[in-house]
Image: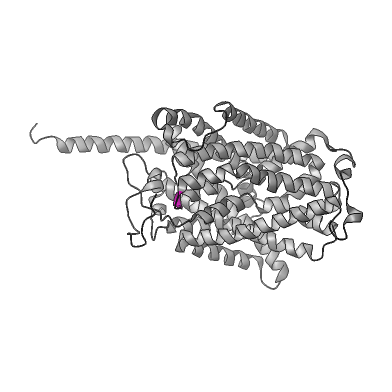
Amino acid sequence: MTPPSASAPAKDAPATGAAAADAPSGAEAPALRQGLKQRHLSMIALGGVIGAGLFVGSASAIAAAGPSIIVAYAISGALVMLVMRMLGEMAAANPASGSFSVHAEKAIGPWAGFTAGWSFWFLLCVAVGLEGIGAAQIVHGWIPGVPEWAFVALFMLLFCVTNLISVRNFGEFEFWFATLKVLAIVAFLVIGVLAILGVLPGSDAKAPGLSHLTGDGGFFPTGTEGLIVGLLASVFAYGGLETVTIAAAESEHPVKGVAKAVRTAMWRIALFYVGSMAVIVTLVPWNDPALASGKGSYVVTLEYLGLPAAGQIMNVVVLIALLSAMNANIYGASRMAGSLVSRRLGPPALGRISGGVPRIAVIASSAFGFFSVLLSYWYPETIFAWLLNMIGAIILVVWFFIAAAQLRMRRKLQREAPEKLVVKMWLFPWLTWVALAGMAVVFVLMAREEGTRIQLYYTGGLTVFLAVIGYALQQSNKLKDLEARVAKLAAREPAGS
């Protein structure tokens, strides 16, 4: 696929390649500029799996599940691998900046594309605010004289402007952010393994062997309930992997990029998540009070080994992870909104393309994210709490639409365009059904746990609300299409007939 030249008109250009996949049948969509190189896409795929949830959020999961957190992350990781394989199959066959929303629309109906797309947009925008708050808290600790909201505004402005200028700017930021994250986690894993083996200088006295895995209550010290809590926490730690299929639509070789990203997902998940959990619970007793202190599992592990300045070093890494997530989420939200509009599933103003970038969508997504930050200051116990509960299970809803769409799309591709099946879901349709069953189990487990039940209710309410609006819009668009066809036929009738 040949990317458009720099001299091509930026506004109102006809859709080509992946951009055209977002448009409704028979329609033209403005063209996004394909400014991402393969190195950008490779690092977005590699770094997208490494988020602040891994560096910080995993500590509370370890404290709840003990060593069995390894099993929890392995189970949820297997589910995520299946989801990414299904999404990769559809994205390689039909690259589109709307990703799973486009696939859901084509396989199930416009209402499904509307529901999956806008719920994901809502999730990303609120997540931008949460990440901004987390990043501001870290920097505020270094510069206490500046209020936290000022840092949030600064970060939001930085990444809004970055995404407004060109997609290549987004790609460059993510390339270097991902590089730093990968180097940090590889260094942590190397240090951890050396410490376990007792060959890290000064760690021989603390080399635990397997004693922390089998002692202190055994491998399942808190029983199945602890494992369930760890499983639920680990499932939502994997959110964000979907962005690579959105970014692929603006890369030089979208099909090749998606195929490569999906095929390497297995070892990335196994190494970064499951490997990290294994190192941490082997080195640190699961009931160490420091794990419940909010420091983060990586910081606790490095401090346990007596490494100097470990806390500050990991704070820098966590800050990078948060800024990377802000950048990626503003990008993903703007592309999803632009895609929805191009398919007549959103406000037309958000779809305006300028300089190959949906700039109004970038501004709107950033503004919504900053507004959610303001709500955290104005109404922390009410409106902001509602926002957090509404996004609690959205990623599961998105995964459900991915699986349902792949189940229908695969058979259609096999009949009509088998050459497009560059990436294939393993053991279709059996593993697709296994993935759907796994999601159903997670939904049931959320309903059982008091802490997650409220999230399930709020997310369910939001999903039903969006589905109703999506269905009404679908019927309205059908009526408009019918009226347009009638008017076109009437215009062709000869006078006096």
From the viewer's side, name the closer residue of 180 and 152.
Answer: 180
Q: Is residue 470 visible?
A: yes
Left or right? Give the position of 182 relative to 348: right
Residue 436 lies, in percent from the top left, at 59, 30
Residue 418 lies, in percent from the top left, at 43, 32
Instruction: Please give the name of the residue rendered at 27% of the width and 36% of the height, measured from the top-left corner.
Output: 483
Left or right? Give the position of 55 relative to 338: right
Instruction: Please give the name of the residue rendered at 61% of the width and 68% of the height, measured from the top-left corner.
Output: 150
Residue 259 lies, in percent from the top left, at 52, 43
Determine which quarter of the picture holds residue 81.
Answer: top right
As drawn, which residue projects farthest toward the right?
205
As drawn, which residue projects farthest toward the left?
496
Task: Indicate yes or no whether the magenta region holds residue 214.
Answer: no
Q: Quadrant of the C terminus?
A: top left
Would you place residue 252 above or below residue 6 in this image? above
Instruction: Please give the name of the residue rendered at 51% of the width and 45% of the height, measured from the top-left corner.
Output: 258
Left or right? Give the position of 46 relative to 249: right
Q: Is residue 113 visible?
A: no
Would you place residue 354 above or below residue 432 in this image? below
* Most common SS among magenta residues: loop
Q: Which residues are magenta?
A: 249-253
Would you place residue 327 above or below residue 284 in this image? below
From the viewer's side, name the closer residue of 4 and 12.
Answer: 4
